[in-house]
Amino acid sequence: MKIAVIFTGGTIGSCIKDDFIGVDNKMQYVLLKEFENDSDIEFSISSPYSILSENLSANELNLLQKEIAEKLAGNYDGIIVTHGTDTLQYTSTAMEYIFGDAEIPVVFVSANYPLDNENSNGFANFKAAVEFIRAKISKGVFVSYKNQNKLHTTIHIPSHIFQHNECDANIYSIDNSVFATYNGHFTLKNAEYKIHKTVKSVEFKEHSGILVISSVPGQDYSFSLEDVRAILIKSYHSATLNTSSKSFVSLCKTASEKNIPVFVTGTKNGAGYESTRIYNELNIIPLPYSTFISAYVKMWIAISKNDDIKEFMKKQIANEII
């Protein structure tokens, strides 16, 4: 069994240096030691870049896309990408949009602590990824991650993963729609998972052109719309916004005049609130039920490809729309 391992840095490839966590490329090879006596596995190592994942940009997404494409053209049974946790969801979702129909599994792994910390889940995440490839359970793009105090490791569908909760390294999927769990053997959880057509390739633009606005009380919506291609608003949990705010209404009207679409995430079928009645009047577009991250990355792709943003956001590209 041949597995291509792509190192990109992150906590899983770091150690503590002068009281700060920094990338140390030697650390990542520690992951392979557990399998050095496994004659059935041959690892092929590459590293297109090595960063802390909070520094992720379009440049890294484009480099990784190229690297994965090259590995998919080779004779491998699977690909493992090591990545930092901060932006794991963004990168894995982007690669799912591009390589979701891959003929072999592409599995992202990360770590909550550096590998020299006894509390690190990096080894468990990597082992589950290797065994997932060995078991030939599915093709496509996935994330392997073991939450703290859990006995099992979870295989997630990237476009279903939420942003991290505050001060919490654990990973959760929307509506608990995980693909499988691993605890010595795999248990499938999502029988409805399908491999969809993908966008094939994207040259991500350096700046996404997306103005992201979080819903918080007292927000001033006097944002500059210079160079903005679309507005993405993170609603409150009940898919509501402060539509009584004069500055919010003014922003929406200015965006409409400039032909800048305004989208809101978090909407789900069912009764809305009175505050949402004005959505049509303000030309606010509720997105299909999905995660914020999947919507953001999808919008960045639409802008990078110069596609019609409104039409593109309605489409099911991978597995993002629940």
Image (cartoon, rainbow, N blue to C red):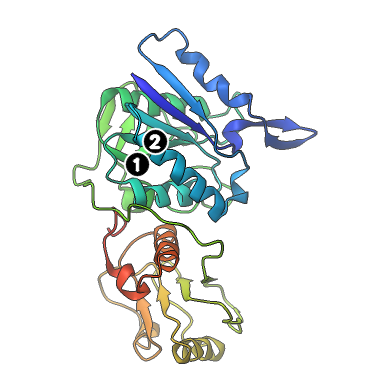
Pointer 1 or 2: first along the chain = 2
Q: Quadrant of the C terminus?
A: bottom left
Place of residue 98 in the rendered image (x, y in percent of width and height, measured from the top left):
36, 50
Location of residue 117 by image quarter: top right
How many residues crowd around disc 2 within 10 Å: few (fewer than 14), some, or many (20 or more)?
Answer: many
> Which residue does the image show at 39% across and 34% down from the upper left?
71
How many residues crowd around disc 1 within 10 Å: few (fewer than 14), some, or many (20 or more)?
Answer: many
Along the line of sight, the residue nearer the viewer: 237 or 135: 135
Q: Judging from the image, what secondary structure is the residue with disc 1 in?
A: strand
Looking at this view, name the residue that lies furthest to the left.
Answer: 191
Tell me if 223 is positioned left or right of 174 in this view.
right
Q: Which mark is residue 141?
A: 1
- In the rendered view, tell whether residue 101 sits above or below residue 22: below
> Which residue does the image show at 40% across and 68% down from the upper left?
265
- In the rendered view, tell whether residue 235 sits above or below residue 86: below
Q: Quadrant of the N terminus?
A: top left
Looking at this view, name the residue that lies furthest to the right.
Answer: 18
The amino acid sitting under disc 1 is Val
> Which residue does the image show at 45% across and 44% down from the upper left?
66
For residue 30, say whether it is visible: yes
Along the line of sight, the residue nearer the viewer: 268 or 265: 265
The amino acid sitting under disc 2 is Val
Q: Which residue is mark 2?
A: 107
Place of residue 8 in the rendered image (x, y in percent of width and height, measured from the top left):
55, 37
Along the line of sight, the residue nearer the viewer: 311 or 199: 199
Q: CA distance from mark 1 to mark 2?
A: 6 Å
Q: Are marks 1 and 2 in contact (CB under 8 Å)?
A: yes
- In the rendered view, tell whether residue 272 sits above or below residue 112: below
Place of residue 87 in the rendered image (x, y in percent of width and height, measured from the top left):
53, 49
Place of residue 13 in the rendered image (x, y in percent of width and height, measured from the top left):
60, 31
For residue 154, say whether it is visible: no
How many numbered marks does the figure carry?
2
